[in-house]
Image: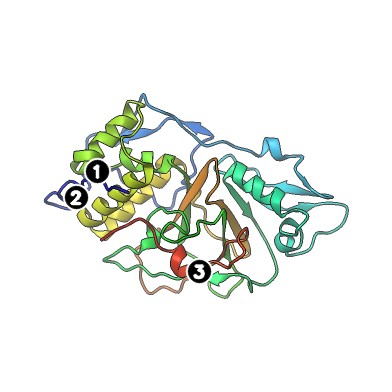
Amino acid sequence: MRSLALPSPPVGNGLQGLRATDVESDATGPVGFERCVPLDPRDTRSVVVPARTIRISSHAGELVHERFGTWRLRLASWSGLGIVVEGLDGEHTPPADYVNEILLTPAHREQFFSLIDRVGLVVCKAVGGDDALHRDVRGRSSRGRLSQGEYFHHDGCSGPVQPRVVEIRCPYQEVARHTFTAIAPFPEVIEAMLLELPAHLRIGELADARAAILADEPLASEWDEVQGALNRVIRKSLPAEDQRAYLRQVDTHVGAYREPWEMGESRFIANANAGHTMQHRRAYVEVPGNRPNGKLVKRWPAEAETADPETCERCVVET
């Protein structure tokens, strides 16, 4: 697969044209919205761009009657990306580990995976049980350099297997998880990356790709080629904290799911299917440091083999 020719990194590391983001704010966008782009660096207003509208659909209404045998999903009130499941309702009290003991049983697993394919993201709250089938999510970032997992990616993108579904879970533990995980629709996240690209990096083929998005025209290159070029130029041209600020701006623009983790929470992400998939990334809301941080665990529940976390964390960044 050919690669896009990259512009030479410009002199200076400023984020001209990139508006600051309140990193503690709710990054979930409305059900349907038009994208906005920054104006002059001194101007904090936004303009609506006459281009494709990024649609974040709420599926809660159509799933009110979704049943898994005698069980029905109990959905939280949520208008953002995907659906949020608070538990199951039925004639009896559901098991604490309702994911493994009901939703992922042979009788219901394909229906559950089809639901994830359809809505993109299913967040299951207050799931009990152990995590024996999961593996720790590894990877550390530093003040001076982003890890691979901080860039948006599909799991398995550098390996022979791209799993249909990725489950990321925050287990019950003594230390709370304070690093977030951002989940965004693909390829809309790449559109957002192009539109939020700092003005001094909008040159060469990235400028052409951005112009095509604004004109509602097809790109000259594949989405993954464009994303690889974006990741490389951002990594080489901006210092670490400016990269993180840019990615937070992308989160907000695309309406990413970026909620704080709760212990016992599992997020099921549509990672590979014939329809619409999601990408995810590790999202810092504070400068990485030595503060204790709860861990996450991961598995690929639709695959026969357990996920290899080393492969999971790789993405399309090339150095």
Q: Residues within 10 Å of mark 2 (few under 14, many from 20)?
A: some
Tell me how far mark 3 sits from mark 2, CA to CA: 37 Å
Q: Is residue 56 above or below residue 151?
A: above
Q: Residue at x 79, y 63 (%)?
A: 95
Residue 2 lies left or right of residue 177; in this view the side is left
Residue 252 lies, in percent from the top left, at 42, 44
Tell me how far mark 1 sits from mark 2, CA to CA: 9 Å
In the picture, the disc for residue 14 is 2
Q: Is residue 303 visible?
A: yes
Q: Residue at x 58, y 61 (%)?
A: 300
**Secondary structure at numbered mark 2:** loop
Q: Nearer the viewer, mark 1 or mark 3?
A: 3
**Secondary structure at numbered mark 1:** loop
Q: Residues within 10 Å of mark 1 (few under 14, many from 20)?
A: many
Tell me how far mark 1 sits from mark 3, CA to CA: 35 Å
Callout 2 amino acid: Gly
Picture quadrant of residue 60: top right
In the picture, the disc for residue 308 is 3
In the picture, the disc for residue 198 is 1
The front one of 300 and 122 is: 300
